[in-house]
Image (cartoon, rainbow, N blue to C red):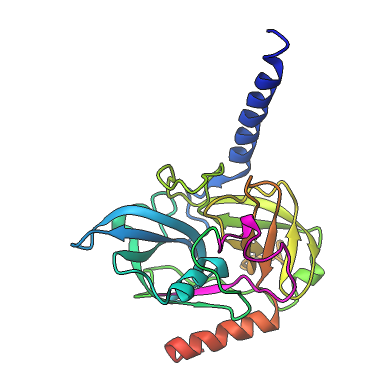
Amino acid sequence: MNNHMRPIATTIIALLLGSMSMSAQATIDANNRYPQVGTIMIWRVDVAGQPVELRAFASATLIRDRVMVTAGHVTAPLQALDGLPSPVRMFASFSPTDARDPKTWIPVVRQATHPSMPFCPPPPQCDPTDEILVAPLEPGIADVGLVFLEHAPKGIAPARFADQGTLERSEGVETIIVGYGTTTPTKGDTSTWDGKRRVRTSKLRKVVDETWALWSIPSYVCSGDSGGAIFLNTHPNKKGKEAGLVASVSDGGQDCRRHNNNNRLDTHTIQHWISDTIKEHLGEN
């Protein structure tokens, strides 16, 4: 190999190894261990209402019979657009291996976004990896949103929030991150998404403030993992004690490695906003 080809070959090998490593870090939830975690998809439909083009997808977690929590940058564009355009529909799926199957879909009927989120139309303006929306870890910004379903998914019990302040006592503890993201950056191309739920582990590095916390990097959260669940089991040796929902995925960086900045769900302020918003929309606590 001549000297001019060596840098190119080295780059290709590094990219291949990086892709393999990322895939190894995120395993498919084939046994459906995390049924509360679903995906929300935006589809362009034809005049008959049939899906013809997947425009975007993200992750979310069932926290009430008909309510999912996700990232605020996923729901905020609806507010900026004053509703979905007529040829666009949003659906949720809880299939662990084939969320693209329309037989698994549940229509989304409304959304809500935390009031701290700035005005943000669709990407790139509402994409945290581009740092146009907000600076990484910007104080006071809660990247949290809610999605309301037409009906509850059959046979799935909602996830339980962790006790308030759990993360403040858990730095260095391993957590479980669950979402429907890809294993490599897509640059907006949705055609290769396989609709599978993936699981990986990551240690909590640092609690930053009331809304943000940092997880270990490389992050291995990627396109479509936004809004995904972060679980922490505070009683791993006690039978019957399920892991609590402590945070949701916000930003893994454009390369799916550089950042692992996520929004806390274990605070009184966020849990109170979620309860109040559900009551406002559904009339229940």
In the displayed structure, would residue 133 be above or below residue 142?
above
In the displayed structure, would residue 108 be above or below residue 217?
below
| Res. 71 in view | no
Residue beneath the point at 54% across and 73% down = 145
Nearer the observer, 164 or 14: 14
Question: Was residue 135 drawn as part of the magenta stretch in this picture?
Answer: yes
The number of numbered badges drawn on the structure is 0
Boundaries of the magenta span: 125-148
Question: Was residue 285 drawn as part of the magenta stretch in this picture?
Answer: no
Residue beneath the point at 63% across and 31% down = 15
| Res. 257 in view | yes
Q: Quadrant of the N terminus?
A: top right
Q: Position of residue 190 (x, y in %)?
A: 43, 48
Residue beneath the point at 60% across and 74% down = 118
Residue 75 is left or right of residue 259, and the answer is: left
Outermost residue toward the left?
Answer: 48
Q: Position of residue 72 (x, y in %)?
A: 56, 70
Q: Position of residue 156 (x, y in %)?
A: 44, 68
Nearer the observer, 178 or 234: 178
* Quarter occupied by residue 150: bottom left
Q: Main secondary structure of the magenta part?
A: loop
* Quarter occupied by residue 265: bottom right
Q: Position of residue 195 (x, y in %)?
A: 43, 50
Nearer the observer, 206 or 97: 206
Nearer the observer, 95 or 17: 17
